[in-house]
Image (cartoon, helix red, strand yellow):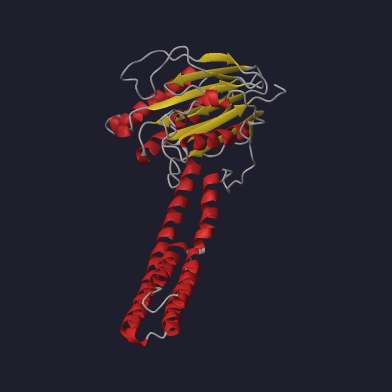
Amino acid sequence: MLQDEARPRDDGGRQVGRGRRTKLSGRRPVRLLPALLIAGGLVVGAVTPAGYTAAPFFCAAPLIAASLSSLRSTAVTSLAAVLGEIWAVTYRGAVEDYQESVAESVMIFVVALLALGLNRCVQRSDAQLASVRDISEAAQRAVLPMPPERLAGLGVAARYVGARADARIGGDLYAVQDTPHGVRLIVGDVRGKGLEAVEAAVIVIGAFREAAEQETTLEAVAGRLERALQREGGRRAGLDQFEGFTTAVLAEIPANGQSVLRVLNRGHPPPLLLTLDGGVRELVPVAPALPLGMGEVASWPDRSDETFFPAGALLLFFTDGVTEARDLLGRFYQPASRLRGRRFPGPDALLDTLVEDVARHTGGAPADDMALLAVQRPMSA
C-alpha cells in the first residue's frame, strides 16, 4: 500500500509536485561541476609534463557555469579559469611552447567572454519562461479554480496534472458547486489541444455553472451543455473548428441528506466509488451515450443512473489521461485494480496517491493531461 504524505502547496492551494522538488535538488550537485573542473585543471597543470595541457578543463568550467549559475557566479568561474590557465603555464615554465601557451590563454579568455554572453541569454530566457508560467497559472486558476475543501458537508479535492511541466492547462476540465438541487459536478475532456480546447472548456464550464443552478434534473443540465456547444460551434462556422466534442460525466448528490448519487455519463471514463472496506466499483452507465457536442450525429433521451452512496465513501472522477497512461511495456493504467484494497482518510490523500501511482506507472510525466476530482460523504451522513 502506498503511503500518503503531506506535500507543500503553492499560493493557489495546489500541491507542489515531487518531480519539481527532485529536479531542483538534483541541480545542486551539478552546480559544483565548474569548481571541480577548475580544480581538475589545476591538478593536471601541476602533475603533467609540459607536453600536456589543462585547457579543456578551464574551457568547460565557464560554459557549464553559464547554463547553471547566475551572472556573478559565471563571472567568478570565468576569472578563475583564466587565472588557472595562466598559473598552469607559469608553473610549468615551458618557454619553448610560449606561443602555444599564449594561444591557449587567449582561447580561454574568449571562451570566458562567450560564457558571460551565454549566461545573459539564459537568464533572459528563464525570465520569459517564468512570465509564461505565471500567465498560464493565472489562466488555470481562472478556468479551473480550486474548489473549497468542504462543500455542503462533503469533502472535496481536485487536481490538474499537465503532461509537461510547462503545459499548465489544456482541454481537461472540472467544476463543482452547491445548488438548490444538491451538490452538482462535472468532469470532462475537450477533444484536441491548445487554446481552442481551453476556450471550449470555458464554454462548457460556464454553461454548466448556469444550468446547474437553474435546471431541476441532470438530464436538463446535459441538454443545456449540448445546446451551448452547438450554439458556439455554429457561431464559429463549424463544429470541427470548435474542437468537435467533449466527453463528460455529470453527477448530483441531493441536498436532502439521502445516500443517493445520480450520474449521467456522456462518453467519459466511468467514475469510481471507493468504500471504507477498500472496495472499488466502477459506475458504468446502463445506457452508453455519445459525448457532448455530437447531437447532429445522433440524438437520444439522456438518462441518469442512481446508486447508493454510503457514508464515508469516496467518489473519484478523472479524465482519460489516467486510463490511457502506459508503462514501458505499453500496458494501460487500471485505476480500479490499483486502488482496490486501499483505504484513504480523505479526498486529498486519494488524489495524492493516484497522481504518484500514475507517475510511478509511466516512469515520469503522463502522456496526456489529467483532471481529477474526489468527493467524500461524511461519516455522519
Residue 267 in picture, x, y percent from top left: 41, 21
Above or below, comparing residue 13 to residue 49 in the picture: above
Against 310, residue 175 (above or below) is: below
Instruction: Quarter of the image for the N terminus: give it.
Output: top right
Q: Tell which of 172 and 35 is nearer to you.
A: 35
The spot of residue 67 in percent (x, y) is 43, 62
Residue sticking out furthest to the left: 237
Question: Which of 335 and 142 lies nearest the eye of the viewer?
Answer: 335
Occupied quadrant, residue 275:
top right
Where 21 sits versus 5, above or below?
A: below
On the question of residue 192 being in view, the answer is: yes
Residue lying at 43% horizontally and 34% vertically, measured from the top left: 328
Q: Nearer the viewer, residue 248 or 178?
A: 248
On the question of residue 185 being in view, the answer is no
In the figure, 6 relative to 224: above or below?
below
Q: What count of labels does the image hold?
A: 0
Q: Is residue 326 left or right of residue 183?
A: left
| Residue 257 location (% of width, % of height) | 66, 19
Give the residue displayed 62% in from the left and 34% down from the top: 349
On the rendered structure, is 269 left or right of 294?
Answer: right
**Nearer to us in this view, 105 or 323:** 105
Quadrant housing the C terminus: top right
Residue at position x 40%, y 30% in the image: 330
Q: Residue furthest bottom?
A: 95
Residue sitting farthest toward the right: 380
